Image: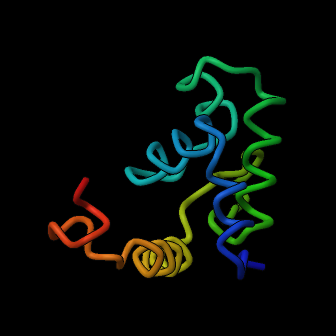
Amino acid sequence: MLMKNAAGLFKILSVDKRIEIIELLKKDPMSVNAIAEALGVTQSSASQHLRVLKSAGLVSDERRGYWIYYSLNREALERCRQRLNKLCSCGCRDGGPAGRE
């Protein structure tokens, strides 16, 4: 279930390690152990972050034999990007009023 409100999305993405996990998963699916090693955290910590990302619909998992591999839900991530872009449509990037001091 993807977060439908911006506050929930911001809360999920307010943790640097979750953003780092998303960055890692852009390349290839990874096991929790590989993610933990790449981030320099415990397997338990990586699992906790993955649970949050999975419950938000941003990552999915797939069992391959003994291991579970996590991958990005690219469609959900794109919907998040579009939602965030709506919040940033004030024109500040284009030199509009909000971008001036």
Q: Residue furthest front?
A: 101
Q: Residue furthest left?
A: 95
Q: Measuring 22% from the left and 65% from the top, which residue is drawn there?
A: 93
**Residue 52, position in %: x, y?**
78, 54
Q: Could you tell me which residue is drawn at 71 percent across and 67 percent down? A: 7
Query: Does residue 8 appear left or right of residue 20 in this picture?
Result: right
Picture coordinates of residue 36, whole percent (x, y): 65, 28
* Quadrant in the rendering for residue 11: bottom right
Quarter holding residue 55: bottom right
Q: Is residue 45 above or below residue 64?
A: above
Most distant residue in the top direction: 40
Q: Is residue 40 left or right of residue 7?
A: left
Check the image and report above or below for 44 versus 10.
above
Which residue shows up at 81% across the image and 53% down it? 51
Please tell me which residue lies in front, 29 or 52. Answer: 52
* Residue 69 left/right relative to 44: left
Residue 84 horizontal/vertical position (percent): 48, 72
Q: How is the image coloured?
A: rainbow
Q: Nearer the viewer, residue 2 or 96?
A: 96
Residue visible at 56% across and 71% down? 73
